[in-house]
Image (cartoon, grey):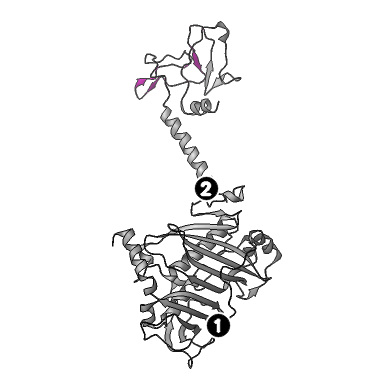
Amino acid sequence: MVATAATSAFYPISSLSSSSDPKVKNTKIGGGSGNLGGFKSKSVSSGSLQVKTNAQAPSKVTGSSTGFKAGDDFISSHPRTFINQLPDWSMLLAAITTIFLAAEKQWMMLDWKPRRPDMLIDPFGLGRIVQDGFVYTQNFSIRSYEIGADRTASIETLMNHLQETALNHVKTIGLLGDGFGSTPEMCKRNLIWVVTKMQIMVDRYPTWGDTVQVDTWVSASGRNGMRRDWLVYDCKTGDNLTRASSTWVMMNKQTRKLSKIPEEVRREIEPNFMNTAPVIEDDGRRLSKIDDDTADYFRMGLTPKWSDLDVNQHVNNVKYIGWILESAPPPILESHELSSITLEYRRECGRDSVLQSLTAATGTDSATSSTAGVVDYNHLLRFDDGTEVVRGRTQWRPKFGNKFTILDHISADHGI
């Protein structure tokens, strides 16, 4: 019925096949009215359907005969054949295809939420929800522009992967509102998430061409906080590459003051919390305060660029790591690799801020020795007026510990 109606909308019916059964006489087209597109049906008497027009039609079009006259039976100007009575099915198929494409587009624009939590997949194919709907997993390929001089991914690259999976997790479970990771109820109250502490431990850095799997989930952190953890694996070997744990609280976007978690927001997020221990246990060590007298290395006049800001108009969390490393001693950067970092965020940084980066060795400074073992440093980012922005602690291990493994890995995969 649908196909017939669609066909009749494109093509006028000029003739129908006859029936040898005399009971088909006086049959009405369309199941009732006997009128279709301005034509009336007449009884079938000579094996073909004769059609009579209701309206006056011009006898000529552009100087040639139209093939029928008003009030007379329709007479084709060409002999009827099976071929010229067939409709142009390509037009009908094109119309059907257009309808299906429009319907698919509307479907993709909807907030898609599958019924089974174990089958949650984001609509763009970036990742999926596993482990009873609590863990989000996503794969990343290490690109050539994401590696450094050591041919391994930088710490900023790993941080970007962590941030991307966190946002995609919130988006996939249907809790992404207008803000940068804010839920719908948070958006109503002008609330945003801000990170207060980040811990990262790197067992091995992936290299160019590697594919890594990043798993992330959230848990409660006290009464008014949230903890997010990550595990990063090598997809080829299954080895654990990186562990990370972070603590988040809410801040009012307009007043820039911390806020308690409203009950409406709590009801949104708590069903997604996992009751698990952090992947990195806090060792309880406080981050030391350093100043001009205790710092060994300085970098002044650091300013954020427009590209360093996120949608909440403050500096992206990843940028702070780059600024901290600005004051790390160059000999350590050449001979060692960052194995762990702990950051405590104390102030947000805006587009007009000017910062200073300070670094102090925790003991005897071994930066001048290429054979130094594991080395620890304390760090501070502060405004020009001395206000603290971020405190940090880093640990560095010698590069030669993984150098031959990394080179063998690159040679095997890329023929170097």
Q: Going 44% across and 16% down the picture, which residue do you hit? A: 69
Residue 196's mark?
Answer: none
The stretch drawn in magenta includes residue 65: yes
Callout 2, which amino acid? Answer: Met
Which residue in the rendered view is the most extreme toward the left?
416
Q: Which residues are magenta?
A: 42-70
Image coordinates for residue 9, horizontal then vertical, percent: 50, 28
Residue 354 in sight = no
Single out the mark in the foreground, 1 or 2.
1
Q: Going 53% across and 81% down the picture, which residue do you hit? A: 389
241 with respect to 61 (left or right): right
Which secondary structure, mark 1? Answer: loop
Name the residue carrying label 1. 287
Name the residue carrying label 2. 108
Along the viewing direction, whichever of 131 and 408 lies nearer the viewer = 408
The alpha-carbon separation of the residues under discs 1 and 2 comes to 47 Å
Labels 1 and 2: the sequence-earlier one: 2
Image coordinates for residue 37, horizontal then vertical, percent: 52, 24
Q: Compared with residue 138, is residue 400 higher up or lower down, i.e. above or below?
A: below
Along the viewing direction, whichever of 246 and 6 lies nearer the viewer = 246
The stretch drawn in magenta includes residue 154: no
